[in-house]
Image (cartoon, rainbow, N blue to C red):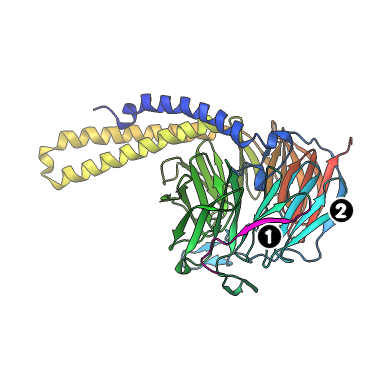
Amino acid sequence: MEPFYMKKRTERCFQIGLSVISLFLIETLCLHAAATGDWPTYQGDNARSGIQIESVHPPLKESWVFKAKQPPRPAWQGEAKWDGWNKVYDLKNRQDFDHAFHVVGADDAIYFGSSSEDKVICLDAESGAMRWVFYTEGPVRLAPTLHKGDLYVGSDDGFIYRLKTSDGSLIWKVRPGPRDYRIPGNGRIISAWPARTGTVVQDGVVYAGVGMFPSETVYVCALNAEDGATLWKTEQTDLPAQGYLVSSKSRLYVPTGRNNPVVLSIKDGKRERVLDGEGGSYALLSDDALVFGPGKTGQLRLVEEGTKDQLATFQGNHMIVFRGKSYLHSDSDIQAIDRQQYLELARKRRDLYQYRTQLNNRVKKLREQKESDHAADIKSIQKDLVEIATELDAITDQMKACLLWKKPCAFPLSLILSGDVLYAGGRDGMGAFDATTGDLLWEGAVNGKVLGLASINGRIYASSDSGYIHCFLPESL
């Protein structure tokens, strides 16, 4: 009997080759903007990779500090203390997308939205001085997106806006919801269809989602970036849309807050599937695989393209994937993993699990018949099951060996990669780690919990839940 996983060996080898090519192409496409030093959208690109090719080397010095008049006013304060039904304690916040003023930037300016003062703000990158302000009629909870010199941003007033970066003047605004109807929501007066997904701009199209009550219908839409005309609109009546959208060339991934991401065709908005997991508004795309979480207990789940079942899980809050390595960030440490080898072992483990299930089902059916007639078959299958168990143990050991390094980290709240340096944010501070060795290179003080980081044109920006934005420069400058 030829094992199930042997039949797929040739197919898997072919897939490995495609994965290597795909990894190169995706890194090239997603990081093209970041390679210039700009940071045009949340986490740098539409894949939310958190990667900046241009390196900002520590030690750093503080250049300036911006303090908002009012700190962020998040839509959701956090998870309950515990899940009594399932007896799960120390729950992670699965809806923390607006607990800091996340910045984007290009050239000599940075931009962010305010959930407390209902506006979009532009600061001078060198001095931190305010250049202009644009007011909306509701909280601006997620970072805007820069595209060809203009700014695209959504607000809880239900509108998607296009603004001039030069002075903040309005070019157009579009309301994807059915009407301008306001309600009390999260302690504010907002649209019944607030924009809670941020914006993604790709190939001249703006993607956004509005609505948080499925019973009132949630809309995910594609708009012409030039004039705001609607290209397609998808209705969701079972899930909300909350958290930063993620896009590839063919698909749009829609976080749904505490629920699991929805996968849409980017061409026409048709739903393809809902992924399995425990939800969360954090998501990133790498090598055509979506990583999302943090679930209830801080677990990141990896789902490959074309499937909805998880291939692997990682205990952690954030992940950076670059040049064959996965950098995993948890409450207590930061580590680097040989990604290609780890995922290939994970695929092999999955195939073995599937084959084992098939064999167990076969044994069950044979035993339901007259066992004496199938004793030899059952004995042969049991021998295969023992061999599978042995190989699974070996794979587990090999997966542990994929760990390249692991170091303590006291900054578990945010993570980006700037060249060959990992920057991590924590409570009242941040740290820089060597991406090759994991060694701590530098620590700096920040006011509040550092929930947002960005690397823009030679500067590191740290945004906190206290309404501060700190700008850091290398000490050598």
Region of the chain picked out in magenta, as a range: 167-179
Residue topped by disc 2: 129
Going 61% across and 44% down the picture, which residue do you hit? 48
Q: CA distance from mark 1 to mark 2?
A: 23 Å
Camera-nearest residue between 45 and 359: 45
Indicate whether residue 443 is drawn in magenta.
Answer: no
Percent position (x, y) of residue 21? 52, 26
Camera-nearest residue between 185 and 191: 191
* Contact? badges 1 and 2 (CB < 8 Å): no
Mark 2, residues whose alpha carbon is within 10 Å: few (<14), some, or many (≥20)? some
Say whether disc 1 or disc 2 marks the residue closer to the N-terminus: 1
Query: In the drawing, does residue 411 fall left or right of residue 254?
Result: right
Q: Main secondary structure of the magenta part?
A: loop
Going 56% across and 58% down the picture, which residue do you hit? 242
Indicate whether residue 177 is drawn in magenta.
Answer: yes
Query: Which quarter of the image is occupied by the C terminus?
Result: top right
The label on residue 36 is: none
Q: Residue 254: in sight, yes or no? A: yes
Q: Is residue 229 above or below residue 71?
A: above
Q: How many marks?
A: 2
Provide the secondary structure element on which disc 1 rests.
Answer: loop
Percent position (x, y) of residue 459? 80, 41
Percent position (x, y) of residue 354? 33, 39
Provide the secondary structure element on which disc 2 rests.
Answer: loop
Percent position (x, y) of residue 240? 50, 61
Residue topped by disc 1: 99
Mark 1, residues whose alpha carbon is within 10 Å: few (<14), some, or many (≥20)? many
Q: Amino acid at mark 2?
A: Ala
In this rendering, the label closer to the viewer, 1 or 2: 2
